[in-house]
Image: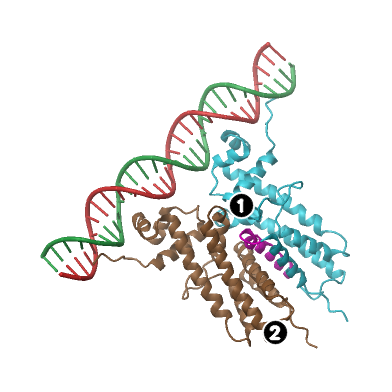
Chain colours: A cyan, B brown, C green, D red
Amino acid sequence: MARPRSFDPDHVLHAAERQFRTSGYNGTSVDDISAATGLGRGSLYAAFDGKHGVLLQAMAGYFARLGQGPRKLLAGPDEGALDRLHAYLLRAVHGVPLAADVPPAPDRTAAACFAAKMALEIGASDPEVKRLANDCFSVVRTAVAECVRAAQRNGDIDPDADPDDLAYLLLTIIRGTDVVGAYGHSPDRLTSIAESAFALLPRPRHH
Amino acid sequence: MARPRSFDPDHVLHAAERQFRTSGYNGTSVDDISAATGLGRGSLYAAFDGKHGVLLQAMAGYFARLGQGPRKLLAGPDEGALDRLHAYLLRAVHGVPLAADVPPAPDRTAAACFAAKMALEIGASDPEVKRLANDCFSVVRTAVAECVRAAQRNGDIDPDADPDDLAYLLLTIIRGTDVVGAYGHSPDRLTSIAESAFALLPRPRHH
DNA sequence: ACCGTTATTGACAACCCAGTACAGAACCAT
DNA sequence: ATGGTTCTGTACTGGGTTGTCAATAACGGT
């Protein structure tokens, strides 16, 4: 009974996310978002409540995508848990894809965890952003910890190791590759870091 | 023969660095820097060439401080290299101090690697910042790698491990703690992560 | 005590930005 | 076809930002 919106909200949020990723929050103006998405000022305010609203909704979408990745890749039977962990680690250091059907990132600079980047920039003065970033960390951390436990049950990881400690460490490494990898390091180097980390996981001492 | 400047450049750059750390580059105005340092606009432009100049010089100072830390803590005889690595790791995850006589940081949020934070925010469009950040990474990485080699010579680390790979991994972990630790995680948690990482270092298999 | 040189201060002008308001367009149900 | 409702684009405004300029103050050599 009324005029339908002529854009796809997800597409708009993806474009905005890309913009925020490359220019930062304070570095992108509403006009930048407008240009990147094709929407006019008015539509942006009506649909997303302005710049800050766009950011929050873009981060929420990112969170949803982020949650699916680890859960799908890491969940499963105890058997093969270590392999899943390996595969996830290699994948994670190369960034979270914008969408399921989109390759992870054009350049690694823009692939760094969106939530972490926004949190580092404005999280100190923006509790909502801070909370969203923490949620992103938590979902990865719990999924990894669960997978570590599965691998322990299967005898692939030293049962004496604390799965939560390991999960924290792995999360730290993944976030670290965002920073290290964002500038001047090749994907090969990131892969190498991930492999090194995986190789150091505590294996059970067999007999 | 002319009026001397009435401020200490280092003190000004430290204050500016603190401001940049808490508010980000685009989040701090020249007036903010002016208020934080006590200098007027004109003096800032005359002495540091404006906001961007202040950032570059503050980062250069940070780089100098950063370089001293690892080198002093990590360099030394082969004997005890592993202990030095351990001590450095524990120290690094709690941030780089503003000055030699100043405690590392009031809150961990502002302690995250200054260079990494600036590089993540504006490095994509600021080659000079990007280069400075890479320099910061390099100095830590090479110092760590050298210490790993020393520990290997002393038989404390598996001689088959690639010291450069390990150094990259450790650098990644340190940078990761900046991100993870910046929001919502206690210093104890960071210490725990550092200890976990240290415990996983590949020891030589003794007979 | 004076004067050249340099720092400091405060104000100013041009510009950019976020958010709002209003006018027009598109759609659908009737 | 028409009308009500919602979307879309643009123009406007108040506030904040940057970089500069001229006037003033402070110092040291002479």
> Given the image, on which type of amino acid does mark 1 rest?
Glu
Residue A179 is covered by the magenta coloring: yes
Which contiguous range is marked in magenta? A165-185
Q: Position of residue D2 (x, y in %)?
A: 66, 13
Residue B71, can we see it? yes
Q: Which residue is mark 1?
A: A128
Q: Which residue is mark 2?
A: B156
Q: Quadrant of the C terminus of chain B?
A: bottom right
How many numbered marks have been drawn onto this rendered protein structure? 2
Would residue B76 appear left or right of A69 to someone viewing this image? Answer: left
Element type where label 1 sits in the image: helix
At horizontal 79% and vertical 56% (from top left) the residue drawn is A71
Badge 2 local density, few (<14 within 10 Å), some, or many (20+)?
Answer: many
- Closer to viewer: mark 1 or mark 2: 2
Badge 1 local density, few (<14 within 10 Å), some, or many (20+)?
Answer: few
Q: Quadrant of residue D29?
A: bottom left
The answer for which chain carries disc 1 is: A
Give the camera-side residue of A11 and A130: A11
> Given the image, on which type of amino acid does mark 2 rest?
Asp
Q: Position of residue B111 (x, y in %)?
A: 54, 66
